[in-house]
Image (tube, rainbow, N blue to C red):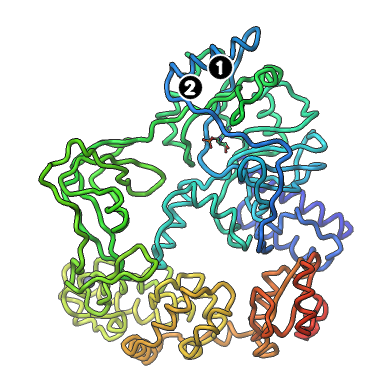
Amino acid sequence: MSPKNKINALREELKEHNYNYYVLDKPEISDFEFDQKLKELQDLEAKYPEFYDVNSPTLRVGGAVTKNFTTVAHEQRMYSLDNSYSKEDLEDWEKRIKKIVDGNVEYTCELKYDGASISLTYEKGELVRAVTRGDGLQGDDVTNNVRTIRSVPLKLRGDYPDKFEIRGEIVLPLEGFAKMNAERVEAGEEPYSNPRNTASGSLKLQDSAEVAKRPLDCLLYSLVGENLNCSSQFESLQKAREWGFKVPDVAKLTSSTKETIDFVNHWDIHRHELPYETDGVVIKVNSFQQQEELGHTAKAPRWAMAYKFKAEQASTRLNKITYQVGRTGAITPVANLEPVQLAGTIVKRASLHNADQIEKLDVREGDMVYVEKGGEIIPKIVGVDFENRDPESTPTVYIDRCPECETPLIRKEGEAQHYCPNDEGCPPQIIGRIQHFISRKAMDIEGLGGETVTLLVNEGLIGDYADLYELTKEQVIPLERMAEKSAENLIQGIIASRKIPFERVLFALGIRYVGETVAKKLARHYKSVDNLAAAKMDELIAVDEIGDRIAESVVDFFQDEKKKELVERLKSHGLQFMVSEEELKGQTDKLEGKTFVISGVFEKVSRNDLKKLIEKNGGKNTGSISSRTDYLVAGENMGPSKRTKAENLNIPILNEEDFLRMLK
Ligand code: AMP
Ligand code: ZN
């Protein structure tokens, strides 16, 4: 087979597997096999750049960066929907319809997916553009980001029209959302508040590689265009499904409001079993012919109606507000409720987020409050029943001292959360830090769990994570639920953890905002803790993806005498504070001290790999051209303003070949 044919065959095959996995949810090969084939294709594409294709399955991982999203006018306006809340509302709507159209009216009932609306344009079976709804008349071109969403087909199958638009909703399924939040909490960051906002925020990220990491999904519900070759909504959904789009199959044809209400009632209950959030049902007149007769109002089509589910709400008494202290010292107020049934579970606690939220809602202990369950993991309080408030009650006064150690709390400019600054002496912070240190993604100490850490701290055997390495078997044996064997395992586990690579040790230190990925970045860039500790603010910021907040936190950490001492003690116990020989392989100083800006699209190596190559060889990546830039590496389609700027500043412009030659 010629390379070209081989590449095409692999692309076609991967497209099928991608479809089976992400659209049909029925994979036919293992992830491992998939990765093997992908790797094979990547290698071929690198070897034969002349067969580049933006829609190749290898490019799902992203890499393209959009600094400013271009505004694009919608060919046909993206309307809102009118809302209805009761059977009566729907009957009124039906009457209005019957006045305008003759004959029977059928309806397609669909779920109203709660995410960010998107319009996708396909030409000759390939995705050419993805645009947000914006104000309905024009939106932002987010094509680079949408390409990374695995359930969006880049190439279609079957018998599709030459050119058409399809609309749908980009959602963040609940499971993926929960996972993202767990990772954020682990890195000491505030969790995202709900899947919808996170989905729409994701579309506007500048780096598509970041978008690719988010488990977004795209559900389609409407075809727009001429020559669609179908005559009804229901049929068009069927067609879209055949062309490879993910169209949920809950859609149902009904011929009366009564049947529609049955559909609504069914899904009002069963929607909680779906992997993503919905906030209602959308009912559409099925026949395109009748849709046309009905037309639009200024705001919405007359042929469609949203029916909003009532948010699952319950009212109950707020008994007490308590305050939790996290491992980074962040304070979270918690509402302790009179237990109440909500969306199938009994709720006893709800989040109050922070002091501003309490003030905004004006919640007080003893109030009757309304609790809702959204996409959040714990339910939230959305309001107070003021009429039932005890006239004697007084506004909640937020605590000003740590509930665990009495230290006065602080609140940094621009941050919503209060913090307990006593990180050395505040028990939940001490325990939390050590628990983080031993956790699976950090030092992964076998034989030691979170509860044992609490026990060890409470017994006064350890006070920080360096103390772990000084523990003896004899000290541990007398502890509750310990025996000779388990104590031995614990000590062995601690000894074994000395081999854990630097990047994970760095993560384990628990520097605020330094999560798993940031730790990797820093470890690769600085190669040793000494280099990192010596780094200045502006040097840190120059590292790819390190912003002010992270940089400041790193600098603070290594300026703290106590932290320095901790690191020294860990060093003396033989932990890895340098990238190992093995990891260093392929690393050189060829680009030492040189700052690069990469722009455009490349043929042989992806942007990401180019950046990695620069870092591996000691160079620095930055996003924008300044007098401190040493080289601009220019690919295809680089913006003309970058080139002009580089020329004005006399910065050498390299193409891909020139750059690769520098490394030879
Ligand atoms: P609203 O923003 O409340 O006016 O509702 C209109 C929005 O609902 C549209 O812009 C779509 O993004 C969204 N939507 C979600 N599911 C559907 C669906 N099945 N059909 C039409 N619109 C939908
Ligand atoms: Zn404290």
Residue type for callout 1? Thr
Q: Residue furthest top?
A: 103
Ligand 1 neighbours mark 2 (CB distance < 8 Å) = no
The percent coordinates of residue 275 (x first, y second) are: 48, 41
Quadrant for the C terminus in the image: bottom right
**Identity of the residue furthest to the left in this view:** 392
User: Would residue 656 appear left or right of 455 to someone viewing this image?
Assistant: right
Picture quadrant of ligand 1: top right
Q: Image height check: is 360 above or below 338?
A: below
The quarter of the picture where the N terminus appears is: bottom right
List the residue tagged with mark 2: 263
Label 1, secondary structure: give it.
strand
Residue 254: mark in rendering: 1
Instruction: Tell me the SS state at disc 2.
Output: helix
| Mark 2 / mark 1, whichever is N-terminal | 1
**Residue at 19% across / 81% down in the picture?**
475
Rendered residue at 35%/35% (across/down): 312
Q: Amino acid at mark 2?
A: Phe
Q: Are marks 2 and 1 in contact (CB under 8 Å)?
A: yes
Whether residue 449 can be seen here = no
